[in-house]
Image (cartoon, grey):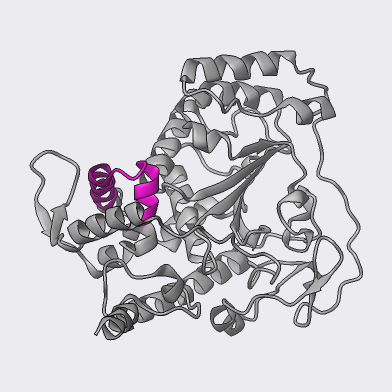
Amino acid sequence: MSAEVASNSTVPNGSADPEKAATDLATRVEQVKIEDDTAQAVDIPVADFKSANETAVTSNGTQAKTQPESASSASKLNLPRTAADGPIKTPLAEPLETSKPATRPELTAEQETKYAALHKSVSAWTEIPETSAKGSKTTSLTDSERMFLTRECLLRYLRATNWNVAQAETRLRNTLVWRREYGLEKHTKDYISIENATGKQLILGWDLEGRTCQYMRPSKQNTERSDRQIQHLVFMLERSIDMMPPGQETLALLINFAETKSGQGATLSQGKQTLNILQNHYPERLGRALVTNVPFYIWGFFKLITPFIDPLTREKIKFNEDSGIHVPREQLLKESGGFVEFEYDHEIYWTALNDLCELKREEYRARWEKGGKRVGEYEGYLKGANEKSLAERETEAGQSSA
């Protein structure tokens, strides 16, 4: 792909009119001259790194220690931390200390009031339908479902509905029903394993704002089109969420079309299904999407799928940018312009990824139980940051007002 594509290939993001957005994109695509050779990953020599256990060299040449938040889980598995650890076959252990989530602004008084209203309503839920079918039997909320309803989760749905409490409550309930109906807990690592046998998706490293990096490599496609391909994507999204450090709620999606042949990408139907899942049941989870090495026939796919992408999501998609601008090269795959020499061995990687995520989920649940199994618990506390639980905050507030 020529440099001309890289400089002009952005998704139209200013219009709320889907047809106009698609037309704008099509016009840009037609104006771009596609050359025979597609863009290749930048081959950047690895710098002289010190041991990853000591320091990691940041992208601007300064040194920084790695973050400690994940150490309790990652240290048990002795995972590598950066490219300095040589050829990598597993997920990395933790973000660099310099990869820090941006601080969210404090809620306004009006937003706090709306959150309190949503929290009160959701806390009163005792049962939800088992399926989305009309008249479906209702059953009690499980502990896992109550644990899903964190403070930050409720706020994500409020932001996604422009702070409409009634709509946020409806969408939250719909998501819990969808999670039951879709069977998330039935999609085990063993059931999904075959889909990742060639490493077509990877979770490795964090971007400059601490977002988990989830790679999609369509050229590694190894299975026929089926529901399990979408289930695989959802499974990996859940693992990316497990890997998010405290203070970060979004992920970075890196889609590399290098060496992808026609027919290896998603169909329009799969694309629409994926967007429906992401936009309805994982709102406010995509931080950025970096799409590289886009062949001409994939532009046609983006032209067709653009009308189904909401404007805010379109703004987060970047085409053919240097991924090293967004992800420290010490934690970025070499094929994407980074320093990490990665060799995919399914048995090693799949075991390490799932062992790490299972440890994180166990620690997360233990903190939730210790905090009193509360709806509206703080995710920072649950993820092991130095933050107080909801119960501790309420106790302090009661003492200060006494």
**Residue 160 versus residue 56: which sits nearer the camera?**
160
Q: Is residue 187 visible?
A: no
Quadrant of res 51? bottom right
Q: Is residue 184 above or below residue 35?
A: below
User: Where is residue 366 drawn, in percent x and y?
Assistant: 36, 81
Q: Is residue 321 above or below residue 103?
A: above
Q: Residue at x 7, y 42 (%)?
A: 135
Q: Is residue 307 above or below residue 385?
A: above
Q: Is residue 75 left or right of residue 165?
A: right
Residue sticking out furthest to the front = 402
Question: How many badges with numbers are in the image?
Answer: 0
Q: Main secondary structure of the magenta part?
A: helix
Q: Is residue 174 left or right of residue 200?
A: left
Q: Which quadrant would the N terminus be assigned to in this image?
A: top right
**Residue 276 versus residue 62: which sits nearer the camera?**
62
Q: Which residues are magenta?
A: 155-176
**Residue 162 versus residue 4: which sits nearer the camera?**
162
Q: Is residue 140 left or right of residue 101?
A: left
Q: Residue at x 53, y 73 (%)?
A: 356
User: Where is residue 190 drawn, in percent x and y?
Assistant: 44, 62
Q: Is residue 283 visible?
A: yes
Q: Which quadrant would the C terminus be assigned to in this image?
A: bottom left
Q: Is residue 165 magenta?
A: yes
Q: Is residue 370 magenta?
A: no
**Residue 402 versus residue 372: which sits nearer the camera?**
402
